[in-house]
Amino acid sequence: MTEQTQPLGRESFDLSQLAGVLPRFPLGVIVATQGVTRLDQAGTLNACEYLARHAVGDWGDLCHEDWRFNQRSLACGGRLMSSYRVNDQIKIWIITEWDRSSTTLTLPSEY
């Protein structure tokens, strides 16, 4: 975890929204960049909604080749990435590391 990320916790995110979600893979420690945290707290995006989509294998707005790469990574243990367009100006990326030790929610500009 870097200075620019912070763990997602009940204090800053409503993780109860993930109740009932059956992840297809371990998410590890879940962290978010400052930009994602600010947008979530402002109500501009719902970070848990996108995290839930990522956890069930809805990779969002990826090209066909990247979508297939994620499917292979599920089977072989590679890195997983999702991309979601929140609105015309905002896109969020979610990345789970190859060893499933952590998942990061970030804005492309913060990557």
Image: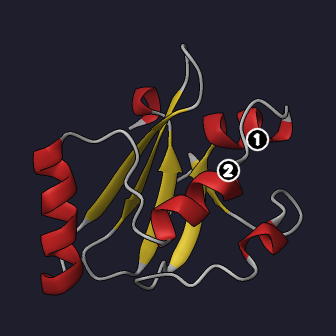
Considering every residue shown, the one lying at the far right of the view is 11
| Residue corresponding to mark 1 | 40
Q: Amino acid at mark 2?
A: Ala
79 versus 62 height, above or below:
below
Label 1 – label 2 distance at C-alpha: 6 Å
Number of residues whose C-alpha sits closer than 10 Å to that of mark 1, classed few (under 14), some (14–19) or many (20 or more)? some
Name which residue lies at 32% across and 55% down: 81
Q: Going by the image, does 14 lie left or right of 58? A: right
Q: Going by the image, does 82 lie left or right of 77? A: right
Report x, y in % for residue 1: 50, 63
Are the residues flagged by discs 1 and 2 in contact, CB closer than 8 Å? Answer: yes
Q: Earlier in the sequence, mark 1 or mark 2?
A: 1
| Residue corresponding to mark 2 | 47
Report x, y in % for residue 58: 42, 59
Quadrant housing residue 52: bottom right
Name which residue lies at 85% across and 69% down: 10
* Image quadrant where one finds the C terminus: top left
Q: Going by the image, does 82 lie left or right of 79? A: right
Report x, y in % for residue 71: 20, 69
Q: Going by the image, does 61 lie left or right of 102? A: left
Quick one: SS at disc 1? helix
